């Protein structure tokens, strides 16, 4: 194999290895970030009578709408919150019933 092809193969292997390392490191980081987001959402809900919309969660945490919505749904599935609609606007409201 000419030297330039060998260098190219080594670069691909290096990139593959780096991607594997990044993936293995990102799982615990994602779990930690998710836990921090849950706590931030709990704190925000505690200032709003235990009820929070996704938009309010985004405003309180700075996380994206997708991150907040996925986290709220995860909390719904695990039973930490229940869901209802605002009587006037129909907006989905998550109720942190333990607060």
Image (cartoon, rainbow, N blue to C red):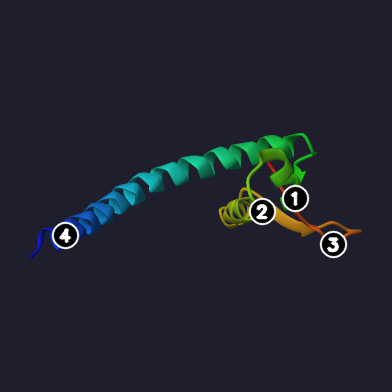
Secondary structure of residue under mark 2: helix
**Crowd band around label 3 with a 10 angstrom C-alpha radius: few (<14), some (14–19), many (20+):** few
Q: Taking 9 as reference, is 56 left or right?
A: right
Q: CA distance from mark 2 to mark 1?
A: 7 Å
Asked if the residues shown at circle 2 and circle 1 are in contact, with their CB atoms under 8 angstroms apart, the answer is yes
Secondary structure of residue under mark 4: helix
Q: Is residue 99 visible?
A: no
Q: Quick one: label 2 or label 1, which is nearer the N terminus?
A: 1
**Crowd band around label 2 with a 10 angstrom C-alpha radius: few (<14), some (14–19), many (20+):** some
Q: CA distance from mark 3 to mark 4?
A: 62 Å
Q: Nearer the viewer, residue 21 or 43?
A: 21
Front disc: 3 or 4: 4
Front disc: 3 or 1: 1
Asked if the residues shown at circle 3 and circle 2 are in contact, with their CB atoms under 8 angstroms apart, the answer is no
Residue 65 - label: 2
Residue 4 - label: 4
Q: CA distance from mark 4 to mark 1?
A: 53 Å
Residue underneath mark 3:
90
> Residue 75 placed where, x, y %?
59, 51
Q: CA distance from mark 4 to mark 2?
A: 46 Å
**Crowd band around label 1 with a 10 angstrom C-alpha radius: few (<14), some (14–19), many (20+):** some
């Amino acid at each position: 194999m000419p030297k330039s092809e060998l260098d190219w193969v080594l670069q691909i292997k290096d990139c593959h290895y780096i991607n594997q390392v990044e993936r293995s490191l990102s799982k615990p980081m994602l779990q930690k970030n998710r836990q921090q987001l849950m706590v931030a959402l709990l704190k925000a809900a505690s200032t709003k009578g235990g009820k929070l919309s996704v938009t309010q969660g985004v405003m309180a945490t700075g996380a994206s709408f997708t991150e907040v919505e996925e986290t709220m749904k995860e909390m719904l599935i695990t039973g930490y919150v229940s869901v209802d609609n605002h009587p006037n606007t129909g907006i989905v409201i998550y109720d942190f019933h333990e607060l």
